[in-house]
Amino acid sequence: MPETTFLDSTEMVLNMGPQHPSTHGVLRVILKLDGERVRGTECVIGYLHRGVEKIAENRTYQMFAPYVDRMDYIAAVSNGLGYCLAVEKLLNVEAPPRAQVARVILTELNRIASHLFWLGTHALDIGAITPLFYTLREREEILKIFEDYCGARLTTHSFRIGGMLYEIHEGLERQVKAFCDMFISKVDEYEELLTHNRIWVERLKGVGILNADSCKQYGVTGPVLRAAGVKWDLRRAQPYSGYEKYEFDIPTAQNADTYDRYTVRMQEMRQSVRILRQAVEGIPEGPIMAKVSKAIKPPVGEAYVSIEAPKGELGYFIVSDGSTQPYRIRVRPPSLINLQALDRMVRGALIADVVAIIGTIDIVLGEVDR
Amino acid sequence: MSKFLRTIFLVDLLQGLWVTFRNQHPKHIYTEQYPAERPRVAERYRGAPRLNINPDNGETLCISCNLCALACPEYLIVVTSERNEQTRRKDLTTFTYDTSRCMFCGLCEDACPVDALELTQDFELATYTRDGLIWDRQMLEEGPKPTRYKF
C-alpha cells in the first residue's frame, strides 16, 4: 500500500504566455505552482528581439534615431530624447532653449500617454473594462498633438540630434492648454471609477510588495521605486533638457504594493500637467535646431545619458570611434530591469495576482527584448 | 459607521457606475466611421511617398542626386540615372521605393534638396501582393489609388 493516499501535492509547472493577453505582449512566464500559490517564476524573453543595438552599429547616428522609437513604442518620444541627448553629449552641443522647452512639452505629453495606456490595460487585466475606453479617448488627444507636430502618432521620430527638425506648429500652445484644462477632470473621473472601488482595492492592496531595499538591489527605478517611498526622479536628481526650471513634486507612497504604484502614477499624471502648464507659458523664441553638421562625426569617446522615462531610468551608452557610425550602443531599458523583480514580487502570491503584478510593473516587450 | 453604510449601500460601485452613465450621452461618441467617414490627417502627416513632377511640363523634379537613398535607414530606395551629354546633367531612369520595409521616418524627404521626394497624407497603402508594395517611378508620381467605397 502506498504511503500517501491523498492527492499528490507536487509542484506543478504552468506556462503563462507568450500569447497570454495579460502579459502585455510576448512575455512567457513559467510559473511553479503549489495549488493556487506561486512558488517561483521564470521569465522567458526574446520573442520580440530585433537586435536594435546591433542595428545601430551599421547605421549612422541620424539613421538610428527612428529605431529607438520602436523599443518602448508606448513612449517613443522619451526614447528619442534619451538617444538625442546622448549623442549631443558626445558631440558636446546643446539644443537651443526653444527646442528644450518643446522637448519637455512633448515628453511630458508622452509620459501622460504612457501612463494612460498603462492604466487602461492594467485595469483591463484586473477586470475593469471601462477605464480602457476613457483612457484611450484622452490618449487620442495627445496623439493628435503629436501628429500635428511631427506627422506621426506612435513612432514619432520627433527629435533630431541637436534640437528638433520641425518648427513648432501653429496652435501647439492652444492645444496643450486645452488638453491640460480638460485632462485634470478626466483623472478625477478615473479615480472615481477605481480608487475606492472595492474590487480594485481588494485586488491591489498588499499585492506584489517590493520594498525600498529590494528595489535598490534589483536596480528597479521609476514609479515602482517611488511607490516604495524613495524620492528618486532623474528629472530632479540630474536635470536634463531644462527640467530644473519647472516646479513639480515627486509623488511617493509608503506601502510599496500594487495599489501604491497606481496612486503614484495617478499623481505623476497630475504633476505632468503642472509641468506642461509651466512649459507652454514660456516657449522662448529663437532657433529650434543647433548648428550640427550633416554628417555627424563625434570625437572618439563614450557617453552615458539617462533620462526619466515613464517606466523608469532609460539610459543610452554610446561608444564612438570617430566615424559616422557608433561603435557600440547599449541601452538600459527600464522595463527589462524592472521585470527582473517580478519573481520576488509574485512569490507566495496567487495566480490571479501574477496578472496584476505584471501589469503594475508597466513593461513593454519591445523594450524588454529590444 | 459611515464606512459600514458605504459598504452596505455599495456607494463605491455606484459612484463608478455613475461615471459610466454620464458618458452615455450621444455627444460622447468617439468612434470614427472609417471608411464611410474619412479621418482627419495632419498637414505634416508622413504617409505614402510621392515623387513630385513639375506641373508645367510634367518633368520630374528629381535630380538623381541619390541623397535620399543614402539617408534611408533601411536602404530601400534605389535610384538609377544616366548622364545626358547635352545638358551635362543626370537624367532619372528608374526610382524604386520599397514601402513594405519603410518605417515612414521622413529622413528621405529631409535629405531631398529639391523637394522632389515627399511623404504625403495618403495612408491607404494596402495591396494584395508583396510585389505591389514595391513602388516604381510611375506609381510614385501618381500616388496610391485605394478603393473608394460608397455608402
Image (cartoon, rainbow, N blue to C red):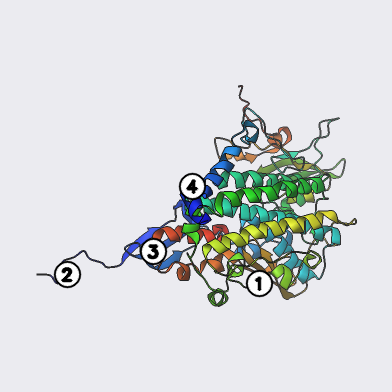
Q: Which residue is mark 3?
A: A31
- Observer-side mark, 3 or 1, equals 1
Check contact, mark 1 vs mark 4: CB within 8 A.
no
Q: Is residue B87 above or below residue A322?
A: above
B108 left or right of B35? right
- Observer-side mark, 2 or 1, equals 1
Check contact, mark 2 vs mark 1: CB within 8 A.
no
A87 left or right of B123? right
Indicate the position of residue A79 as horizontal and vertical percent values.
67, 60
Amino acid beneath label 3: Leu
Q: SS for tag 2?
A: loop
Disc 4/disc 2 C-alpha distance (Å): 49 Å
- Observer-side mark, 3 or 4, equals 4
Indicate the position of residue A56 as horizontal and vertical percent values.
65, 63
A36 left or right of B45? left
**Image-quadrant location for residue A178:** top right
Check contact, mark 3 vs mark 4: CB within 8 A.
no
The single residue placed furthest to the left in the displayed view is A1
Disc 3/disc 2 C-alpha distance (Å): 25 Å
Q: Which residue is mark 4?
A: B9
Q: Chain of mark 3?
A: A
Q: Chain of mark 4?
A: B
Q: SS for tag 1?
A: loop
Amino acid beneath label 2: Thr
Amino acid beneath label 4: Phe
Q: Which residue is mark 2?
A: A4
Disc 3/disc 1 C-alpha distance (Å): 33 Å
The quarter of the picture where the C terminus of chain A appears is: bottom right
Amino acid beneath label 1: Lys
Q: Nearer the viewer, residue B145 or A259?
A: A259
